[in-house]
Amino acid sequence: MHPFEYVRATSVDEAIAALAKHGERARPLAGGTDVLVMARAGRWELDALVDIKHIPETNVLELGSSEFRLGSAVACYRVYEDEQVAAKFPGLVDSASIIGGVQIQSRAGLGGNLCNASPSGDGICPLIVHTTTCVIAGPNGTREVAAEDFCTGPGRSVLEDGEFLIEMKMPMPQKGFGAAYERFTPRNEMDIAVAGVASSVQLDGDTIVSARVALAAVGPTPILSSAGDFLAGKEATAENISAAAQAASGDASPISDMRGTAEQRIHLVGVLTRRTLERAVERARENN
Amino acid sequence: MVEKIRVRATLNGEPVDFLVAPYVSLLDTLRDELGLTGTKEGCNDGNCGACTVNLDGRIVDSCCVLGAEIDGSAVETIEGMAEPGKLHPLQQAFLEEAALQCGICTPGFLISAKALLDAEPHPSEDRIRFWLAGNLCRCTGYDKIVKAVQKAAESA
């Protein structure tokens, strides 16, 4: 591994300065479960890792009246061990509790999962269906990007050299909102998704006012499916959910690899879309 | 030339103060700088859990942490598990249930299982299996390990 410096930043400005000093030869470090493994594997030749998890803003975990703020360095366990957060965001718990094993969940967070920009990242689609806004800091100030626009290719994101993710903001679930995530893996745990789907619905009685469906591991980036728009204004019936599942399958553009064939993945997207929509509707009804 | 960083931490209850190159993992720091070779290297990429240690009350893969990151933290390794002259109940149960063969994964399993039993003294079999999913064993087939953890839980 190329010898790099370790910089522990304690403020956003300090992190920006440290990242600016090294340009493309520096990367932010949060949980480290991806970046250290990739640095060791020679993915980059780094001169510095800038530890951003000692910055107050990246550690925020705050349920506000209208908005939930999730710092980019908040580890998975903090999401599911916080009873109030877990109760309000079961769709995030669905993913935070299956990213790696307990050891990984002690360090890795949904923010790092997003920045790693793997098409199969379990944390990304749940953020997309919660209509998450990502707050990015850089030398020219902060900017905001929607979660569905964050990833630009396998392992690539909108983050420019010198920028890092500070926090993610999502609307507080209102009455009648529900979300869920499910993936398919050959093992029960410690595995990478063959396919994954997150769904959310906003119900008014039996009518779906709005919905979002996002697909993992079936394209070069996580995909915001047309299935959500299809459901808007329709009743939450088995027929409509089946039709939405078919629409989601049509949006998938997977490859065949050692984890599964393209055909299997397209089939899985349909199954997982139906299941996660059903669970999201169930949770939305409980949340009435 | 990258300069070494000074790190002050608590290791198995004792204060430590050492220098480490900033790119060296906590795993290599423990083994090579601090002489604690009980923590094992398996995959070195966060999959197998052989290098599991307890960092500030939570289990982590020490291959995915930098030694420099533990400044100000408390780390517990397998060397700190037993009291002098007396095995920890989990270690005793692993021996009695033959929950190991080659032994490379054992320190990691013990650190993980201890964290579980410290937080939940009587976990279900399902809970034990899910908790230990981040620890791989290629010898035992896991049943003996799960039984040993159950036995240690019963004896506590």
Image (cartoon, grey):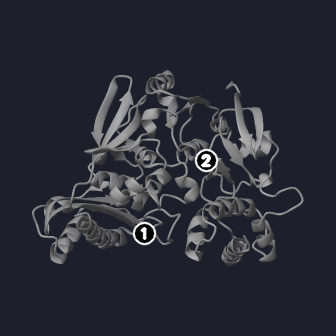
Say whether marks 2 and 1 touch (CB < 8 Å): no
Q: Residue at x 71, y 37 (%)?
A: B9
Q: Secondary structure at mark 1?
A: loop
- Going by the picture, which residue comes out furthest to the left? A233
Q: Is residue B51 above or below residue B102?
A: above
For residue A119, which quarter of the picture?
Answer: bottom left
Q: Is residue B135 above or below residue A6?
A: below
Q: Nearer the viewer, mark 2 or mark 1?
A: 2
- The answer to whether any part of residue A150 appears in the image is no
Q: The disc labelled 2 sits on which kind of residue? A: Cys
For residue A219, which quarter of the picture?
Answer: bottom left
Q: Chain of mark 2?
A: B
Q: The disc labelled 1 sits on which kind of residue? A: Gly
In the image, A43 versus A96, the foreground residue is A96
Q: Residue at x 74, y 43 (%)?
A: B11
From mark 2 to mark 1, how far is it between C-alphas? 28 Å
Q: Chain of mark 1?
A: A
Q: Residue at x 62, y 71 (%)?
A: B122
Q: Quadrant of the N terminus of chain B?
A: top right
Q: Secondary structure at mark 2?
A: helix
Both on one chain, marks 2 and 1? no
Q: Residue at x 34, y 36 (%)?
A: A135
Q: Position of residue B65 (x, y in %)?
A: 62, 44
Which label sits on residue A223? none
- The answer to whether any part of residue A41 appears in the image is yes
Q: Which residue is mark 1?
A: A260
Which label sits on residue B64? 2
- Going by the picture, which residue comes out furthest to the right? B85
